[in-house]
Image (cartoon, rainbow, N blue to C red):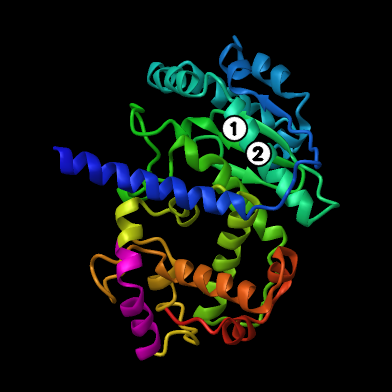
Amino acid sequence: MRLILIFCWLVLAFSSSCQSDQCSNAANVSDISVEVEIIQLEDKIFSASSPSAIQEALQPHKQYLRRFANLTGTPQDSLFYQEYFRITQDPHVDTLYQQTKATFSNIESLKTDFEQAFRHIKYYYPNFQPPKIYTTFTGLGSLGDDILVSDSIIVISLDFFVGDGARFRPKVHDYMLTRYQPEYIVPSAIMLMSDKFNRTDQADNSLLAEMIYYGKSYYFMQQVMPCLSDTLIAGYNAEDMQVVGENTQMIWSHFIDNELLYETSHMVKPRYVGERPNVLEINTKIPGRIGRWLGWQIVQDFSEKTNQALPEVMKAEDARKIFIQAKYRP
């Protein structure tokens, strides 16, 4: 027992040290202020006594209705409100709603995390204007996605992110459920936001180009959320991270030996960057999306070797040039 406790202490100490080192390299954003507004719609929706009451509660939020609910202001919109009301009257859905309320009884941590990320984005992109943030409830996708991000709004369906204790979980593969936890909300939103800044060569259909694209999105998260753990950036659990860390050279050798970097086949590329529980072509223990993780390592080396700040890294379009200048060697 004592050995186990010592081991656990060492792991925690090492993790804290790594996180402290990451935070110590963060940009100084103490003089940057941003205004973060989170509008909670879930309670308004569930307290409504009729479809028309839901419509009345949501009417002031035009951007939410237009972008998230895809409503156009026509009589057909009434079907949306009727379905929403029907869902709120389902006792099974109400159970999930009550669990959602309990999990997110205080959203101050969400607000703080978004604020910190937005301050860092504004540090690198002074013209950045924070989007308005909505939280909502969709019955696990019956009436919307888990997260929507646009220039002007972010919408978060909180019921997706209740976590392991939820009576009902999102209808995804088990290996993906680890990313439907409260701590993944802000990182997931920020990764989606990175697309606005991520320049790519649309004519390059290579696996390397996709790896670099995802690598830049991970790098964006790393820079604007500098205290974020690598597991939350990569979407891997601790065991996956250990496997990847211990087998990086073998993984890289597989890519090189099989000449995968410039592969353009739509049958081959998803095996390495798509959602899968593991990459059987390499080893049953290697987690899916390993190409994204490799892309992140390459982009980090590119930034260090060329001494380029985040905006320059995100603007770099030529995946082959990034790879060459990174001189990545695991």
Amino acid type shown at disc 1:
Leu
Q: Quadrant of residue 179?
A: top left
Amino acid type shown at disc 2:
Phe
Q: Position of residue 5 (x, y in %)?
A: 22, 39
Can you see residue 229?
no
Image quadrant containing the C terminus: bottom left
Residue situated furthest left in the rendering = 1
Report, in whole angstroms, how far the alpha carbon at label 2 lies from the one at label 1.
6 Å
Specify whether residue 253 is painted magenta: yes
Image quadrant containing the N terminus: top left
Residue underneath mark 1: 110
Q: Which residues are magenta?
A: 243-258
Total numbered labels placed on residues in the image = 2
Q: Are marks 2 and 1 in contact (CB under 8 Å)?
A: yes
Can you see residue 222?
yes
Few, some or many C-alpha atoms within 10 Å of disc 2 (few <14, some 14-19, many ≥20)? Answer: many
Vertical comparison of 174 with 276: above or below: above
Residue underneath mark 2: 114
- Is 111 or 149 nearer to us in this picture? 111
- Is 231 or 274 nearer to us in this picture? 231
Specify whether residue 67 is painted magenta: no
Q: Main secondary structure of the magenta part?
A: helix
